[in-house]
Every structure is written in structure tokens, then in C-alpha cells.
Image (spheres, rainbow, N blue to C red):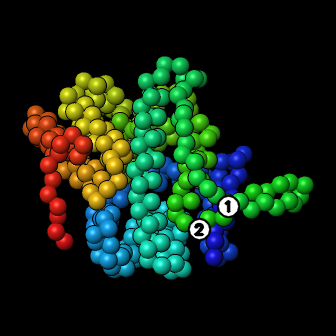
Amino acid sequence: MSFELRIDKNKRAFTLSNGQYEYSNTINDEVIKIVTLDTIPFRRRMFFTQDHIDYKYEYLKANIKDIIKIFSSQLPPIAELINYVYKTTDIERCYDDLYNLLYLLLSDGSQLTELALLQNKCEDRYALPKLEAIPTFDANIKVDYSDCKTNYCYIINSVTEYINILFYTFVSNNPIVSVCQNCDKLFVPKTKKLTLYCDRTINEHITCKQIGAKNKFNDRIEADPVLRAYQLEKHRIQMYCLRSKQDKYDFFDEYYDWLEMFETKIIKYKNGTYDGDKLIEEIKAQTQNFQPYSKGKNFVDKEY
């Protein structure tokens, strides 16, 4: 059974359906949810090595319900697609799809983050930078003619196809994107005006935008050496992961290990409960442990 993905270009909305399951949303909202999803809870043991292929498949069999549960709370279409692929194809196909999913979340999110940083620096808000290139992909399209109108829909068989199509549709409309300077997550501003804070709720009573207005975080981050050191190192490691050669060493672990090490500390620093000088020294101390292998990083094979 395949899924039909129909996109309304005027409304920038889409519907995903397979006859029993249907989901409708705006493309902007869904793409932002996809690229900001926290994948740390389930990515740690998904090793991309030929040496441990049996172990990987056993891990997926034992944890597929938990993986689907994580997506179901925030991305029900992806959860449905994973569930469908897992039940109707072999475990190898499901594993490949999950691998592609992890890579796309990291890759697409990084592209949009770089675009957001360029747009934030652009003084002419009516001539904002655009993505110069979008990776090509194959897609099956069904065409029908009714009510004097030609209708198109994509035939979706995997999570990879689903994300590629939504991402392509999103960026082909030359979107305005920004990175919230409080929660560090991507969002789509409502106007062309420079917007530094999103409307996400941090707790029951306050949003990032309210925090930004109160603390003038846009001035603080430029003047704060701790936040600047954190952002520069985070971006460097993320770029290294994306450009790393795909081999027996899981480049996703490099990025997420660093995030697990410093995300909680930077939040505590922002709240005034962690020493800034200490945090800078800790970031510098870890730099040598997060270098590309091509630059002589020492490593030891793990045993599982």
C-alpha cells in the first residue's frame, strides 16, 4: 500500500493519505517540526557499520515500537510511514529508511540554519539570500484530470521520499527562516522584518519572544563570549559531521555526543546557574576530541 501526497500550492498545504489514514497540515509547519525534532533518545545505538549488521537489525526489531512512539507525538505522518514500511517490507529496508531519516533531519536542518544566518545578516529584507542548490531525487507522480483541472499527487513509499518532497516544496517557495536566539531552534517568521525570537512556549507562562523582549538577548549573544564560543563550536562540529566520509565510524555520534555534553550546561548558564569561564574552558578542552579523522584524530575501535 502506498501513500498519496497532495500539495496545494496556493495554500502551501498538503494532505497525506492511504485510504485509511489521513493527515493535513501546512508545509512550513511540518518542515520546521521535522528539522527541529530531537532524535537523541533513539539514535545512539543505530551503528552504521557492516561489522555489526546483525546487531543493528536486532536492535530495530526490539525498539521499533519506541521509535514509532517518539515520532507519533510530534510527527504522526512519519510515524505512520515507518510503521507501514516496517510491516510491509523486510527489516533491511526499514533500517535503510531510518538511516536516511536521521541523515535528512541533520542535513536539511543544517542547510536551513545556514540560510537563516545569512538572512539575519542581510540588510535588504526584500532581497534575502536563497538556497542556491537543492539535492535532486526521484519521485513517482500520479496525474488525473477532473473539473477542468489537472491534478498531481506524489506516490510515497518511504520516509525519505516524504521528507525530500516536503523539503523541496518548502525551499522552492524561497522561504524566510530564522534561528530563535533563545531556544536555538529554526522557525518561519510571519513577515520579512528581522525576527530573532519564535513563539514557542518555554513553560506555561512565557514564550521565547517574551524572554527576548525582556532580556534583549540579541545584544547579549553578540557580547557574550560564552554563547559565542558555544555557537561557533556547535556549528563547526555539525559541519564536520555533514562533510565526513561515510565509513565504519558513525559521524552522527560525534555531533550528538557533543550536544549531550553541553546543551544542558548552556541552558544552566543562561539561567545563571553555571559559571561562564568554566564552560568556555570545558568547550575548549573538548575541541581536540571532536576533530575530523582526516586531520589525525586518534580513535580506538569499540567492541560491542
What amino acid is found at the position of numbered circle 1 in the picture?
Asn
Upstream in sequence: badge 2 or badge 1: 1
Image point 32% across, 77% down: which residue? 54
Image quarter of the N terminus: bottom right
Q: Name the residue beneath numbered marker 1.
A: 140
What amino acid is found at the position of numbered circle 2 in the picture?
Asn
Does residue 126 appear to the left or right of 105 in the view shown? right
- Marking on residue 228: none
Q: Secondary structure at mark 1?
A: strand
Asked if 42 appears above or below 184 in the picture, the reply is below
- Report if the CB atoms under discs 2 and 1 are less than 8 Å apart: yes
Q: Is residue 273 visible?
A: no
Does residue 277 appear to the left or right of 182 in the view shown? left
Q: Name the residue beneath numbered marker 2.
A: 157
Across and down, in percent, residue 56 comes to 32, 73
Image point 28% across, 71% down: which residue? 52
